[in-house]
Image (cartoon, grey):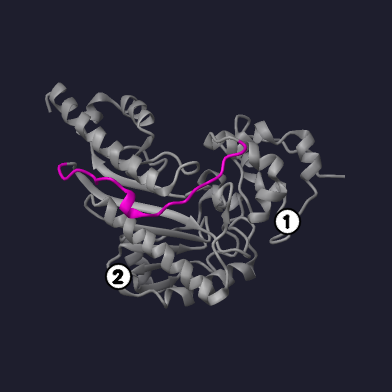
């Protein structure tokens, strides 16, 4: 007999809609080959919390395949793609037209992607041995990075207090204690097998074994999005080549869903390209008006304290909205064009409000 059908607290989540009794009975007893992951583990957040929109995580690449009766409709609905869509990746910086205009008051640019190494579980399901295996592979790969990508790896285990404080001051350190990540199984054996790599200039970072096996990040002050994207593309290739040379393994890349991540909302490019920009005119006009305009431009506004941190002052984090169904180049272009448009409109709104 399968486990009894769960009481899904997030009643309006995609999990509540797509995990039907019939699908549950068909899949509840199955365990994946890579990390022994179950459907119950996958939907734990939707079952325990009442505030989930999506509410499901994958414990390994197998999860997407073995539980496809649940994952496929969720992914299609969330990303707005058709059942026969295929994903195309494109990291060619030469295809990007223009840049953020020089007069736009941008404080900084940050672009991140996630990557997962084939043969290991994803964070919610990864075994202790696999997690340490990923870290060891990355330690070796990091040692081969050269030029402006060269730097140091700082494991969380046994971290020196001075190093820890510096990483906190730089806003580089990821912490334990996120309830979602805990319930999803991503903080098991904390802090073992986890760490942070950054180059000397602090413009290229890799988080190891947080929500994804790898979060690769390129960032710098000012508004040069092209330079940040170019470094990211080089960094991803350098890390990928190094992992391949070391282990013969590639990044998990699905022909349908692009780069494989633990959270289905990140499938495809797994990319979030963002700038911190001052928009005093839009601030005066009101947050609802800004949100509506961003929706039209296919970008997302956030407060500068992150997803749920609220808004402080006139500085906004503006990023691409989509992940899957568009290439990296298209998403970066969309963000550049969106920010340039928002600022041109902001100047007019400043005049309107007498700023």
Which element type, helix, strand or loop, lies under badge 1? loop
Q: Residues within 10 Å of mark 2 (few under 14, many from 20)?
A: some
Q: In the rendered structure, does residue 339 fall within the stretch colored magenta?
A: no
Quadrant hosting residue 43: top right
Residue position for label 1: 32
Label 2 sits on a secondary structure element that is helix
Give the extent of the magenta segment.
83-103
Quarter holding the N terminus is top right
Residue at the (59%, 65%) spot, across then down = 189
In the displayed orientation, state which residue is furthest to the top.
352
Residue 350 appears in the rendering: yes
In the image, is 245 to the left or to the right of 161? right
User: Do the residues under discs 2 and 1 have CB atoms within 8 angstroms?
Assistant: no
Residue identifier under label 2: 148
Residue sitting at x 60%, y 29%: 12
Residue 163 placement (x, y as % from top left): 36, 71
Work out which quarter of the rendered image holds the C terminus and state it: top left
Instruction: Decide which of 170, 62 is in the foreground and name it.
Output: 62
Q: Where residue 117 sits in the image (x, y, percent)?
A: 56, 64
């Amino acid at each position: 007999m399968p486990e009894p059908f769960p009481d899904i607290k997030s009643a309006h989540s995609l999990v509540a809609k797509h995990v039907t009794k019939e699908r549950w009975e068909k899949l509840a007893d199955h365990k994946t080959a890579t990390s022994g992951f179950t459907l119950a583990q996958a939907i734990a957040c939707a079952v325990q919390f009442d505030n989930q929109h999506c509410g499901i995580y994958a414990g390994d690449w197998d999860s997407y395949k073995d539980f496809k009766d649940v994952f496929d409709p969720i992914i299609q609905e969330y990303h707005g793609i058709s059942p026969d869509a295929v994903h195309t990746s494109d990291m060619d910086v030469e295809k990007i037209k223009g840049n953020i205009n020089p007069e736009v008051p941008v404080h900084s640019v940050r672009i991140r992607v996630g990557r997962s190494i084939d043969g290991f579980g994803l964070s919610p399901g990864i075994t202790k041995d696999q997690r340490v295996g990923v870290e060891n592979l990355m330690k070796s790969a990091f040692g081969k990075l050269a030029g402006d990508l060269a730097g140091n790896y700082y494991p969380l285990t046994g971290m020196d207090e001075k190093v820890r404080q510096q990483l906190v001051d730089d806003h580089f350190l990821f912490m334990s204690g996120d309830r979602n990540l805990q319930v999803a199984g991503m903080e098991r054996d904390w802090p073992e097998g986890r760490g942070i790599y950054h180059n000397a200039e602090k413009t290229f970072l890799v988080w190891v074994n947080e929500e994804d096996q790898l979060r690769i990040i390129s960032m710098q002050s000012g508004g040069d999005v092209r330079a940040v994207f170019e470094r990211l593309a080089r960094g991803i290739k350098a890390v990928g080549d190094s992992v391949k040379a070391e282990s013969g393994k590639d990044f998990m890349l699905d022909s349908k869903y692009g780069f494989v991540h633990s959270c289905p909302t990140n499938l495809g490019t797994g990319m979030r390209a963002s700038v911190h920009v001052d928009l005093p005119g839009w601030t005066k006009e009101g947050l609802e008006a800004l949100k509506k305009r961003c929706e039209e431009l296919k970008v997302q506004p956030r407060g500068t304290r992150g997803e749920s941190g609220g808004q402080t002052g006139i500085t906004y984090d503006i990023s691409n909205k989509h992940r899957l169904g568009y290439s990296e180049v298209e998403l970066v272009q969309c963000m550049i064009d969106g920010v340039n448009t928002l600022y041109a409109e902001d100047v007019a709104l400043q005049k309107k409000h007498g700023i």
